[in-house]
Amino acid sequence: MKYIILISLSISALTLSGCSSNSPKRQGGMPTEDFVTHIKPDGSKIFNYSLIKKMPNQGQGQMGKGRGKGGGMHGGGGGMKGGGKPNMSQMKDKMQEKAHKKLNLKLAQTGYCREGYMELESFFERGLVTIKGECNESATTEDSKTFPNSED
């Protein structure tokens, strides 16, 4: 009987350690990128590039609730809130820099914008960077074949 209990506890411990080792991989996983091209009838080449990093669900909900409550109270919460902003700003800057590097790499790999691009707009949010741009050159016949517009 003691052996059965010991084996059951060992299996439970291994199972729990396996689950906990999975968690950091999902939290610190590689960002997903999305690159969508569109060639307009006038030959202008537009693109949308997004870099999406999965954020842990548990921490986000708790932090959001804590900040919401702390924002209405004047006291100790203000110090934590002020201390968190530079860190979030640094994370945002790093994510923006990473997105621009990856976008430039994607454009070089695909050959979509051979003469550079103009950034039309960008959107940055925790875990998401989206850059919309237009290539400096007009589309060639070959571009239209290589980068067909998807039917919406």
Image (cartoon, grey):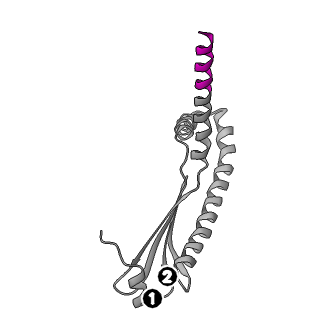
Q: Amino acid at mark 1?
A: Ser
Q: In the rendered image, which quarter is residue 89 located in?
A: bottom right
Q: Please give the name of the residue rendered at 52% of the width and 35% of the height, measured from the top-left corner.
A: 65
Indicate left or right for 139 with 74 as reference: left
For the residue pair 15 and 132, the one nearer the viewer reads as: 15
Q: Which residue is mark 1?
A: 138
Q: Look at the numbered disc 2 and give the secondary structure of its residue.
A: strand
Q: Which residue is mark 2?
A: 135
Give the magenta range.
1-13
Magenta stretch, main secondary structure class: helix
Provide residue 140's location: percent of width, then percent of height.
43, 90
Residue 151: in magenta span: no
For the residue pair 152 and 24, the one nearer the viewer reads as: 24
Q: In the rendered image, which quarter is residue 150 located in?
A: bottom left
Provide residue 152's location: percent of width, then percent of height.
30, 68
| Circles 2 and 1: CB atoms closer than 8 Å | yes
